[in-house]
Amino acid sequence: MVSLVQTSSRESEIVRFLSFTRKKVALVLGVSLIAQSLLLHIQPTYAADTKKAAATPTPTAVTTPAPSAGSTPTAAPNEPQPLAKSAIIMEASTGAVLYQMNADEAFPPASMAKMMTEYLAMESIKEGKYKWDSPVTASKNAADVIGSGQLIAENETLTFKDMFSAMSIYSANDASVAFAELLGGTEENFAKMMNEKAKQLGMSDKAHFISATGLSRSDLKNPPASIDGETKMTARDAAILAYNILKDHKEILEFTKIPSAKLRPTDKTPMINWNWMLEGNSTNVNFKKYAYPGLDGLKTGSTDDAGYCFTGTAERNGMRLITVVMGTKTEPERFNETRKLMDYGFNNFEMKPFLNAKQAIDSLKSVNIKKGVQLEVPLVTKSGLTFVARKGAKDTDFQVTTESVEESKLVAPIAKGDTLGKVKVSYNGQDKTVDLIADADVEKGSWIRLLFRSIKNFFSDMFHGIKGKA
């Protein structure tokens, strides 16, 4: 009897020992699996823990690239038929081309070439080489130039501002040559500067300058020996040049909008602006029928070879247009044809805001963040997007695509404002991109938080795996 009791007791001890051993083995295996899981979840890596600088945002309308033939919205009905050799309409903030006719054939621009002289003169002010009150002296070569102007005597000194006024208001050739010699040493060297700047501004290889004035070679007393050909540019080139002037040196409008002004206080006769379409001419009995609301620039030009040309600009309802006509037959005609272009642009197109700054995008409202206190962060646009659109365009006419940065960059810590994605919007040949930025800070989680999150995720994944097999 005792023997049987002892045997039963030993068997119970063996069973308890085996049960305890199985639990220990299971625990060791469980801990091993959890450890492997934790290594995958919280093992530090340089790529994961190092914050990377935000990428440079893609330029929007404010930093629009040089205009090109490919940025043309769908044409509106009733396109104009200007009486000119070539013509173009461009929206001034985006460079979008709204209409073009023979816009890529080169013609003599006459005094519209002075827009490049004006650009380089204003650039020298911006770079600090000169000030508006710096003295500019006209040489004999400048004073003797033919054509419009002939206001300035040999060795006469004017301020930079007064000399610029003579060039931009009255299209003075003598002032243009004075600037060429000031900035380039000689007019020939300055013409080389003009050609180099044309390349930098994105003008075509058809754009070619031989003088600061736009005069034909036969009218130059000292034609450049090192530069062949004649001054020429396309209507698109003229529009691109005007686009860059307005983008980089919008102060030019403070000069070009002036209908008339005296060069010197003692002058009896004022300089009359050749631009009859200035809004400021609306009360001028001679020009009021040409005056156009909102028009404040930019440059006329005429020679026997060029005919009558005009690069105009006007602003209405928050939209500024640039128009170019080349090779019209008469002085009034260049303004009448410009009116057709301006009316067409303003009547059929408008600036349409499509995205606002700090706006959430439905297709990418947030992104998941690794190793953070929060598991995700909301995204908003860094800036807004505005398009030149046909009047009546609907939001459904715009195509929107989004994408986030690569997953390796979506790791805490994240600072509010970090670039974590981008949104691209396309409309009728206009493609614009804006950054998507974090709308909140995400701190890096503590190791204990990450440990428990990993354990939770491990058992959650295991549970769902078992459930899925059941």
Image (cartoon, rainbow, N blue to C red):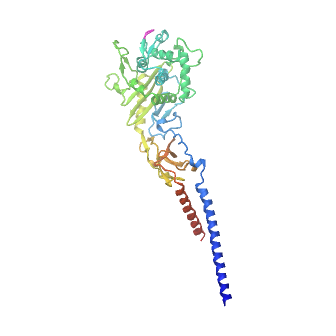
Q: Nearer the viewer, residue 341 or 132?
A: 132
In this picture, residue 63 sits left or right of residue 314: right
Q: Among all residues in the image, which is located at the extreme bottom?
A: 1
Image position of 125 with respect to 317: above or below: above
Q: Answer whether residue 154 is magenta in the image.
A: yes
Residue 253 in view in this figure: yes
Residue 422 in view in this figure: no
Which quarter shows the N terminus?
bottom right
Image position of 153 with respect to 305: above or below: above
Residue 58 at x, y = what percent?
52, 40
Q: Nearer the viewer, residue 464 or 238?
A: 464
Q: Which of the 4 image quadrants contains residue 311? A: top left
Q: Which residues are magenta?
A: 152-156
In this picture, residue 280 sits left or right of residue 198: left
Residue 467 at x, y = what percent?
57, 69
Which quarter shows the C terminus?
bottom right
Image position of 114 with respect to 94: above or below: above
- Residue at 52%, 11% in the rendered image: 221
Residue 405 at x, y = what percent?
55, 47
Q: Among all residues in the image, which is located at the extreme front?
A: 2
Q: Nearer the viewer, residue 14 or 382?
A: 14
Q: What is the total number of numbered labels drawn onto the structure image? A: 0
Q: Nearer the viewer, residue 329 or 3?
A: 3
Type of secondary structure dominating the magenta stretch: loop
Residue 108 at x, y = what percent?
52, 22
- Residue at 44%, 38% in the rendered image: 78
Q: Answer whether residue 229 is magenta in the image.
A: no
